[in-house]
Image: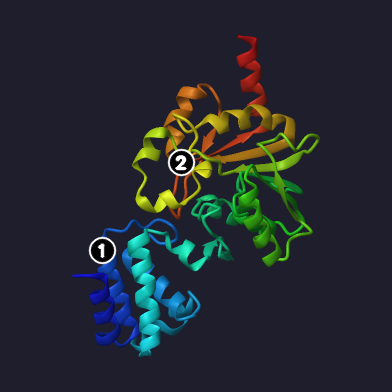
Amino acid sequence: MTDKIYLDEAINDLHCILDMVRWSVSRFNDAQLYFGHGTDNAWDEAVSLVLYGLHLPQNLPAQTGDGLFSARLTKSEREMIAELVLKRVQTRLPLPYITNEAWFCGLPFYVDERVLIPRSPFAELIESRFEPFLTGSPATILDMCTGGGCIAIALAHQYPDAQIDAVDISPEALEVADMNIQEHQLSDRVYPIESDLFSSLQGQRYDLIVSNPPYVDAEDMADLPDEFQHEPELALAAGNDGLDLVEHMLKQAPDYLNEGGWMFVEVGNSEVHMQHRFAGLEVQWLSFAQGGHGIFAISKESLIQFFNSKESH
């Protein structure tokens, strides 16, 4: 059956929001789409797409209950939704790139193909204020490899007195980050900085460094679903074991951390390679109630001890 017939059937035979959501789920399942950029299943993806197509807030079903789904739609609304479903299926574009909106820490962000779509367990860490590692509120924070600025901005909301440097090597990503900083009215506290890791930060010191760097190893890069091919490779790939950038960061971080400072780094599936590359480094792996893995914490003191011992051998 052709896409045109699919569309004509949907537009002519379906009537209410529930109809369009169900039809969308069927099309997504038939196309074997991958979900992992804001939703993790076809139903939630379809609800999100339909609400976007109708210019309705994403949290509306939570406010109205199931009654919303019986609302009837005009023909032009059914046409809009059907076209969005077709675009999602044919292009394999992740939905946030179609809607230009992603949510992180309960906050909305603009996203496009210049930046990764936020999906990091860092959200849970930020909301828990990095307990039990941080005992007070950090005054200076570095978000290394900031991408669209989501982590930096979420940190600014959590720590209203902190100054945050949002660093990335990609000028295109920083354009998106600056848009989000302006939208959240944080230009007085969150600063987008173009830098190859620490190269443009000479003399800066931070109480807290967080980083969600590129960490996908060569094997995983080759196996990524089509949806990930739309994300910037620069923000994903990091060598054979996924830890090329992480090693540079760990070596340089002590020079940029204040006494008592902490560093948190996400390495995802490359966690399995950490013990081999950094045998003896006292990292603390974190667990997450809301799902996710592959983030470790390490103190400035532990980094200094480790790299001093390496030099002495």
Q: How far separated are the C-alphas under marks 1 and 2?
A: 27 Å
**Badge 1 amino acid:** Asn
| Residue 99 point in image, percent of width and height | 49, 68
Q: Which mark is residue 29?
A: 1
Residue under the image location 62 percent in, 51 percent down = 172
Horizontal placement of 262 versus 206: left or right?
Answer: left
Residue at (42% x, 71% y) in the render: 48
Quadrant housing residue 182: bottom right
Query: From the viewer's perspective, is 183 left or right of 34?
Result: right
For badge 2, the amino acid type reads Gly
Q: How packed is label 1: few (under 14 Cα within 10 Å), some, or many (20 or more)?
A: some
- Looking at the image, residue 183 sits to the left or right of residue 113; the answer is right
Quadrant of the frame with the C terminus: top right
- Quadrant location, the N terminus: bottom left
| Residue 119 on image: x %, y % | 49, 54
Comparing 173 with 59, the one in front is: 173
- Determine whether 243 is above or below 38 in the image: above
Q: Depth check: 205 or 235 in front? A: 235
